[in-house]
Amino acid sequence: MPERLLPASPNWYCSRSSDANAKGVFGFGAKNSVYLISITSSSPVVVGELIGHRERVSGFTFCHYLGQEDLCASSSDDGTVKIWDCERKIMLKEHRAHQSTITALHWSPLEKDLVVSGDEKGVVVCYWHNRNDTQSFFPEPRNVFCLSCSPHNENYIAVGYKDGMIIVIDISKKNEVVHRLRGHDDEVHALAWCPEPGEEALHSRPEEGTGGNPLQDRSTTLILECPELTEVNNGLLGGCERGCYLASGSKDQTVRVWSTAKGKGVMTLKLPFLKRRGAGVDPGVKERLWLTVNWPKGHPTHIVSSCFGGELLSWDLMKNGKQKWTLLGSASEGQTHSRIVFNMTSVCVEDNRELLISISMDREIKCWDLSTLECCWTLPSLGGFVYALTFSPVDTGSLAVGVGDNMIRVWSTLSIQNKHDTKTFWQGIKSKVTALSWHTLKEGSLAFGTDDGKVGIYEAYSNKPPQISSTYHRKTVYTVAWGPPIPPLTFGGDGDKLSVALYSCAGEGVIFQHNPWKLAGEASDIDKVIRDTNGIKHKLSPHTDLSWKPDGKILAIGNEDGSVDVFQAPNLKLLCTIQQHHKIINVICWHHEHGSQSDLGYLIASGSSNAIVYVHNLKTVIESPPESPALITEPYRSLVGHTAKITSLAWSPHHDGRLVSVCYDGTAQVWDVPQEEAVCNYRGHKGRLLCVQWSPVDPDVVWTGGDDFTVQEWAVSKQEHTKPPKGKKGIDLEKKRSSQQKVKAKKKKKQMTSKAGSKPQDGEVTNGEGEGRHSVGLEEGPSDLEEEEEKEREAGPQATMSTPIAAASKESNRPVDRIVSEKIQNGGKAFAFVKREVVKEERKREKQEIPVKKRKPRSLLPLSTTMDHRPKEELQQDCLTLAAIRHSKVLPSQCVPGSGDHIQLGLFGDRKALYRMFEEEGKSHIEGGHYDSAIYLLLWKGDITGALQMATEKGELTDHLVSIAPMAGYQVWSRTVEAFVKQLCFQEQFVKAASYLLSIHKVYEAVELLRSRQLYREAIALSKARLCPEDPVLKDLYTAWAAILEKDGHYSTAAKCYLAADSAFDAAKVIAKKGDVVSLRAAAELALIVGEKDLSHSLSLRCAKELLSVQDWLAAQEVLQTQESLLGHQLLFCTNELLWKSLADTALITWSSTSAHSWMAIADDGFLTAVSEVWVKEFGISPIDSEKLKLLHQQLKSMENPPATVNVPIKQLLFHLSVDLTLTLLSALAGSWGEMLEEMLCALSRCRDTGHFILMKEICGLLFPKGTESISNFKGKLDLTDEKSISAAQSLEAFICYLKLYELWWTSSSEHTPLLPEETIAASTAASHNDEPNGPDHIGGAGAEDEAPDDECSAKEIPDVLASAAEQEKPERLEKAQCVLTCKACLSEPHAMLQACERAKAEVQHRLSNMVYHHLKNQGDQHKDHPAATQTENDTPASEPALSEEHASLPSLIALVSEHNKQLAEIPEHVKEHPFPDVMECCLILLHMARTSEIPVDLQKEALALVQKYGTTHALRKACQKFLTPDCTGEVQCTED
């Protein structure tokens, strides 16, 4: 469970979606779950969640029967009613009796197992869960809006309907209505029974017309209901003659009180028109009324109701006068809700105080004290995905929350009185808030970015609207960040020049720099600065994230191709490129700079869609910038465990190297980065996580937000899990499968439409990675704009359900969508073309059997034709009329040939008559929709312009009409072609349309037409055929098409486009995007061909590493051989292969090789000799060419080869060892013996740090086949004045002795063979050259010998009997004795002092951090046990008794740290520079061996002296307690200081 939580918002427009029980637990439906909150008059605490519904929870109610308060019920749009045990958070039973959407729910106050529900069809279902029995009622065919069971009669249920009707039914008499209460004329939103039975007289005003004027006060009107308005079924009251009052609230703005004894209304309360108070509301949001009522149990004469704008009114039913209501929260501003209230629940807690809980559209849950009518507390809730979290660096504890409900919350997390003290900002946002960033210096200045590309700045401590940048992004803003300005941005003059600018990165891949003082000015794209500074000509990869190093000197930018570019401010010089992820970068984050280790300030963590968090150490690159940008391919640490895309990262400001990551797998993971191990895993969310922040004041607390609409605070130390669950691909995947099936079908339609040439819809995702970093808006239904929710509610559920069907039917009229619908009807499969010939033959037979009558073509002159089918007399009269017209030249009266009743004569008269006939026939054709016939008539008349104009207007242009258009002139022809092009585009014949544009010499328009319809192939073909090769349009086409192909995953075709556009760099990059070996190899060869040597270098190296991971040595070397600059890596891979061969017979190698070279076996004279021989033979490496060797050494030295941890995989460890060994051999060939010894030492210490002691032994055997004698040979080549090299040799010697010491311990513990002192003395003669002291810093610790007391059992006083026995022992005993004596190399006092100081300093720092932790806890009044602190108290060092936990103070601990730092400063640098075995560990082993084997007394004394002097920690004291007892000398014993 989280420590604190901001829950999801309660569901809107539900009559009863919240309730409270007698134990003070309040539950409400939010999305598809139920949140449970423990409430008191002081504060709320979220105690759990009921998860099980698949769709929105529409109702929730508790069982109020004594002893069963833990039972509750919920209803959902998934059609189920579930019974829950809220104490155990489990579902007990469920039923699916409803066939329609459930709209109302209530648990009977009298029947302990009766749950009643109603749906929108009017069905009321009674469910007795104990006997699992349901009974359905259908009292009215109306939409049920609310219902309430009587608290006084177990059979009575009041039901309110959408049309305003209220009925009371008796469930003991099926389908029998006791009362029909008519009075409301709109939706009934809530029903509430009077808590006391009986109906005592309520004060009422006279009716209208009986005296008084009820219209004088519009605020309150109290009317006795007319008896005519009610129907009373007398005789049905039975034993309930006393009746009970029932209150109802309706959308008609009235609250009515009904008498169930009389079956009539007794009181009507009209809502007052109050002025809007408290927080403002967007005036553009249209708000409807929701009137809910509650009858408090402790106040039977009062009713609480909601009002227009979120106000709550307490109605005194016994009060005389005009104003019978009192406003809740009137004592102070800002207490009331700012939007309409949906539900109210009353509950008695704490000394019988009655509280009222209300939920509202303003997404706040408020608690009211009904005795004072004041607000006790407010719990904010969230109505969308939580996209961003950020703590203010100035106002400590102010947490800004960016939510998908178009609002920003600022939460004062350190507030003591109100633990959920939040302030909400909504003005000027109007979109999902996806990015936030506090100003680093200015208090209260908060930058934000939104889903629609908006960037703005809010002043959190003022009521002013935000400043909005005039430069908008085209897609979702991913990141906003404050950083130092870069060119060309300048801020005013020198007097008011600032050092901070605002940066924003969005989905289109652009980073803008905004001037925070002049947001109205145009923002600058930083890509121009990057190009100009670094001379980059190729296309930059789209950017996805940016992060400034805390000192403001370095900028890291994440890219879509998975690379991270690191730039030096202010000119943005490229220092290095990190190529590790190979997928879109979602987040990058720098380590803070106030750690105890300066190196940690150079760590940068990055997360992408490949589920691995990589951490890189950029100290070398930043402190010593290379001349050309470095390429980093090896991480400092790889944090593996998540199973989905990484969405956010945060470093702990309290720890060194402590990182928390969140992921789409639904978990948050805390990592110890230096140790490369998981610390804890949080699984409190039930969805994908999107953001994370570490508490700035509590080192044990982390805050996370996700798509479950919650922000959660949780403690690291209280988590039971360590790593994310294996194989988990995301908690909400099952939810998506069921809820996104329709969405997928819709995407299919879009894709097919785009193939047909239409423009893709906005927001269409064509590729998995194209969705951006967080998939903004995915499945975020409840976070849509409130206006849309209200419109849907106004339209009703039926309209909502019919909307997608109507849309689908509309779309199915299009040809492409009809194909899709037919495919869906056919089971989603393609059309079957099997047996096509058989089908054709059957059709032919049917045609032969059934005679088909030829259809007569439609006449072009139908009016005149029909006139020829009149009676004979009329036809003969036409002949007479025609004769008169032609011969007498005197027209009969009212006779106009070719028109009217004589239209048929136009065919036989003159041309004017014919034209009149054509005109009337044309009008008839137009009225009948036969435009082609009308056009033909115009053409026959010779009116080509008119025919073309009509065809254009009616969309009936054809190829024939366009072909004759030139007869009317060039202008007419040009206009006709353009109109025909539009018509063809409407008909989706884009290629044909482009061809017609060519006919009028509009080549560019034709190309643009094809391009706008995504027909890039055709557009490019046309451009190459008709335009000049140098035309920029052609390059733009190639680039645009390549971008689309790249998003769709067609990388090869995209590469061809880039090559054609002379963007060879981008071509190679896009081929490599797939990431497999074949693609990387092809991309590297392509880059080499086109002259991009640096890119070819990096791609070849990446390909070789992929082959190395599967041990394909041959192919890896072939790839590396193509690049002359990769000779150093060829040597490295060769060393790695030979190392693998050398260790193949050991238990360390558990994998096989794909292919290997037939190189020689390891020679007897050592591993390095064998490797050098292969280098000379295969790669032409010669010790003579010193310059080449130095260059190769420098090349490999620049590789990232981080310190290893215990969690590093063995393959990766072997590769890092190969780097060390390759550098060792290069130094040896170049004659740099000191560097060679240091590289050897690095290899051994790497094995020691990882805990691979077997591997360490094998490496020692390979490098030093003769043991310490091999090191002596190397030491002979060193300059004795070179302290650094001498120290490295001594450390190597100590490591070899360290291994021999353990080996001797293991063998002696099994054999129990004592060693004789004579053998040790004889062995000392042979090893004397290794043990000569070289001053106080000698590794043997000469000072320890001087301080060791004389012993009577020393070697000088050995009895003759023992000496004679020694002569009879075997030679192996001499070898063993020599081994014991060489172990003296591990007992170095300078190193013991160094290690003791470091241990003591670490313990004091640990105690100091715990002291600060307890101080902060006490300051915040949060006294909690801290496991780390308890452990520290128990492990107080014995060496510091004066500073026990009781007496330790902050100054004393700081003084101790300073003292230890001084001691460390006095130790020589060459001692601190090189690793050394743990001296105390070696001493303890020697002392332990002394119990089974005889160790020389002087060696024992030296070990005891070192333990006594430097074994100061409690753990060491405890380990060596048995060895520090008084012996025969009485000298060497530990005093309890």
Image (tube, helix red, strand yellow):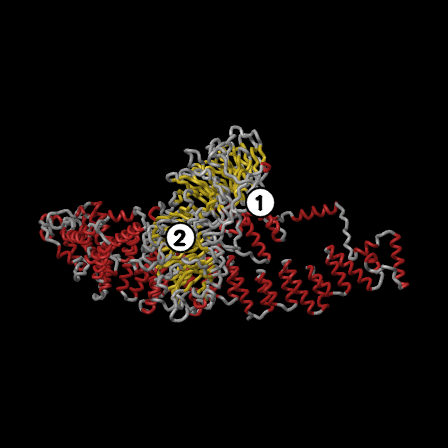
| Numbered disc in front, either 1 or 2 | 2
Residue of label 1: 798
Query: Which of the image's four quarters has the N terminus?
Result: top left
Q: Amino acid type of disc 2?
A: Trp
Left or right: 1033 in relation to 1506: right
Q: Disc 1 marks which amino acid?
A: Gln
| Of the image marks 1 and 2, the number of the one nearer the N terminus | 2
Circle 1 — which element? Answer: helix
> Percent from the top left, x then y, of residue 515?
43, 65
How many C-alpha atoms fall within 10 Å of the one at disc 1: few (<14), some, or many (≥20)?
Answer: few
- How packed mark 2 is, by other alpha carbons closer than 10 Å (few <14, some 14-19, many 20 or more), is many
Q: Which mark is residue 772?
A: none
Nearer-the-camera pick, 12 or 488:
12
Q: Residue at (63%, 64%) from the top-left corner?
A: 994
Image quadrant in which you'd find residue 143: top right
Real-space CA distance between mark 1 and mark 2, rounded to the nearest whole angstrom: 40 Å
Q: Relative to 1472, is 244 above or below?
A: above
Residue 28: where, in percent of width, then height?
45, 43
* Residue named by callout 2: 411
Task: State left or right for residue 1400 relative to residue 1360.
Answer: right
User: Is residue 120 at least partly visible in the picture?
Assistant: yes
Q: Position of residue 1144 (x, y in %)?
A: 34, 52
Q: How many marks?
A: 2
Placement of 470 over or under 184, stated as above or below: below
**Residue at (51, 65) in percent of width and height:** 1059
